[in-house]
Amino acid sequence: MTKFIAYLRVSTQSQGRSGLGLEAQREIVEAHARQHGGEIVAEYVEVESGRKDDRPQYAAALKACRKAKATLLIAKLDRLSRRVSFVANLMESKVNFVACDQPHATPFTIHILAAMAEFEAAQISSRTKAALKAKKARGERVGGDMTNVTPKGLEARQESRIADKARRASAGLHDSSEWPC
């Protein structure tokens, strides 16, 4: 039986508190382990930006993989990182790993996918910066003072957004251009 060590990661504290992204990743890795007759012997959860190299739970997961002779299991390659250098370092570490979204990927394919993820991250950043610049040029407020927002307040905002989205969906409104005035 193949031993797996699951590594789950989300980028922000609010994602970590909601648990939704982690839950989805957990379901994916558990399904993969079952499908391949394996067992998840440990799980490491990180709430940290994928841009950071210094991730304590990731380091602990690698150490556990070496000790247990287990395979690192991640739901999606971009949950590991959107940087080629990070993925390449994992490949050089000699720890076996599987990305459930690309379970049969070769090292060559993994490099290409990591390069595409890095490129997409750069594109997202460029588009976001351009959109914020345009918004600012129109005289609209950009960002907000989050210093006095409590975790409960953030959670309430998120719940409100989810409820609004559900109401729009139940009314058949999926695009902001379809919203009633």
Image (cartoon, rainbow, N blue to C red):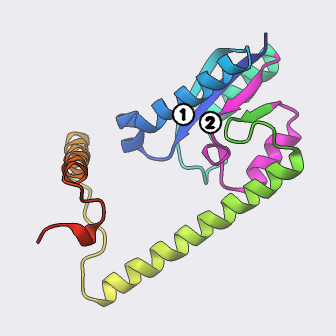
Which residue is at 78% across, 19% downward? 70
| Amino acid residing under circle 1 | Gln
Which residue is at 49% across, 33% downward? 24
Residue 94 lies within the magenta run: yes
Which residue is the site of mark 1? 25
Q: Is residue 4 left or right of residue 147?
A: right
Element type where label 2 sits in the image: loop
Residue nearest the observer in this picture, 110 or 89: 110
Q: Which mark is residue 75?
A: 2
Category of crowding for the residue at label 1, using alpha-carbon neighbours closer than 10 angstroms: few (below 14), some (14–19), many (at least 20): many
* Residues at marks 1 and 2 touching, judged by CB atoms closer than 8 Å: yes
In the orientation shown, which residue stands out farthest toward the left? Answer: 181
Residue nearest the observer in this picture, 172 or 26: 172
Whole-percent x and y of residue 127? 50, 75
Residue nearest the observer in this picture, 115 or 12: 115
Element type where label 1 sits in the image: helix
- Number of numbered callouts drawn: 2
Disc nearer the start of the sequence (1/2): 1
- In the rendered image, the quadrant that contains the N terminus is top right
Residue nearest the observer in this picture, 54 or 17: 17
Category of crowding for the residue at label 2, using alpha-carbon neighbours closer than 10 angstroms: few (below 14), some (14–19), many (at least 20): many
- In the rendered image, the quadrant that contains the C terminus is bottom left
- The region drawn magenta spans 69-96
The answer for how far apart the CA atoms under marks 1 and 2 are is 5 Å
Whole-percent x and y of residue 132? 38, 78
| Amino acid residing under circle 2 | Ala
Q: Quadrant of residue 151?
A: top left
Say if 103 sits above or below 35 in the image: below
